[in-house]
Image (spheres, helix red, strand yellow):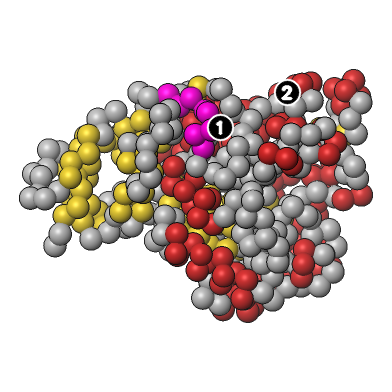
Amino acid sequence: MTVSYVIRASRPLGGPSVDIVISDGLIAAMGSSVDVPVGARVIDAQDCIALPGLVDLHTHLREPGREDAETVLSGSQAAAAGGYTAVFAMANTNPVADTAGTVEQVWRLGQQAGLVDVQPVGAVTMGLAGTQLAELGAMADSAANVRMFSDDGKCVHDAVLMRRALEYVKAFDGVIAQHAQEPRLTEDAQMNESALSGILGLRGWPAVAEEAIIARDVLLADHVGSRLHVCHVSTAGSVEIIRWAKSRGIDVTAEVTPHHLLLTEELVRSYDPIYKVNPPLRSERDVHALREALADGTIDVVATDHAPHPAEDKDCEWAEAAMGMVGLETAVGVVAEAMVSTGLLDWAGVAQRMSVTPAVIGRLDGQGRSLAVGEPANITLINTSRPYLVEPRALRSASRNTPFAGRSLPVSVWTTFYKGALTLDEGVLVGQAHNEGSAV
């Protein structure tokens, strides 16, 4: 057996300090002051929390079709820098990932990059048009082994089609991930509907546009006995509907983005399109409700909704700007600020919501596993003594549209192991030259 690494004195899930030995892609040993085998590299992790590699259920990698914004390779680099060992790539590419051939193309590009597991998400409807079911069974049976389906970016607004999709995926234990947005209620909407939207003269995006779809869909999921996942929950009312559904035993899970845990609509006063996102930034009351729901388990996971855009799609008037924010490289720091620093979650809770549960929802074997002997060595080290100053020029994503530019987040991602191989080494991507200030 060839020993590769010894992680010295890390604290798994924030618990007692232990050493972790990695060999042949697996965790080979754990304990206090283990002997260093010949040839092993020792990594000093005395200031680090060890977590199972992070899993993002909601990432936009843009390839094929918008390689100017992101590629599978650049997105994988950003993911590794953010502590991720698996990402689910959304289907709104060009062409849309609505066939076995397209999802297999994305999956193979992820394998070629070799930095994270890239698990394609299949479209629910052909071309995201909302009129005809996509090749759900063929995508499930493909080499990509698709189990999550979403028209994210658009809502499956036809109730009959949504019911059929929920029924169809039951055959292979799939899940429909719904972008909850009633289109007729959000035509030309620009920001959260509130007193502030009236003051700023921007068309409002009402909370009920999200809540009405969630209410309908949890009832449909209950009726057909299928799995439903709700993307990027953003309102207090949505939280209450999901809480009610779970109390009834309905098989629904939900995600929240890091930016919805920290940022509010007040930032829109600047008219800076960096803050334009779908769903929009909401009120302070909504932010607190989302934090509480993530803490008590009503919301199951944190998912980034990493949405890269080139500069020309953001550096323009608010009404013309694209919606979305990059998030893979800042997610852990934002969650640490919003949830750990506030005492709402401990690091074990972070691991559950950013690794274990996402892997279960996405049916992704080999990810989200416990830090234990014999398990795959997908490991993230979080440095709690080194804050992360967000500098857009240092991001590994091909795009720079972060709302956290210039912000100091309380922790940094220090080291990432993917299947026992280093992908991030003390803040520097393996195989890439170190740029000053680039430590994540």
Q: Which residue type carries mark 1?
A: Pro
Residue 377, image x, y percentages? 31, 54
The residue nearer to you, when weighing 97 against 291, is: 97
Say which residue appears at 41% left-offset and 59% top-offset. Answer: 114
Q: In the displayed structure, does residue 207 sit left or right of residue 93?
A: right
Up the image or down, 260 lies above or below 342; here it is: below
Q: Secondary structure at mark 2?
A: helix
Q: Is residue 67 above or below residue 384?
A: below
Disc number at residue 76? none
Question: How many callouts does the rendering have?
Answer: 2
Q: Is the residue 215 above or below the residue 162 in the image?
A: above
Observer able to see residue 412: no
Q: Is residue 95 found inside the magenta-colored segment of the image?
A: no
Write the start and end of the magenta stretch as one range. Answer: 387-395
Which of labels 2 and 1 is toward the front?
1
Question: Contact (CB < 8 A) between labels 2 and 1?
Answer: no
Determine which residue is flagged by label 1: 392
Which amino acid type corresponds to the residue marked 2 in the rendered image?
Leu
Q: Which residue is mark 2?
A: 267
Mark 2 → mark 1, Cα distance in angstroms: 18 Å
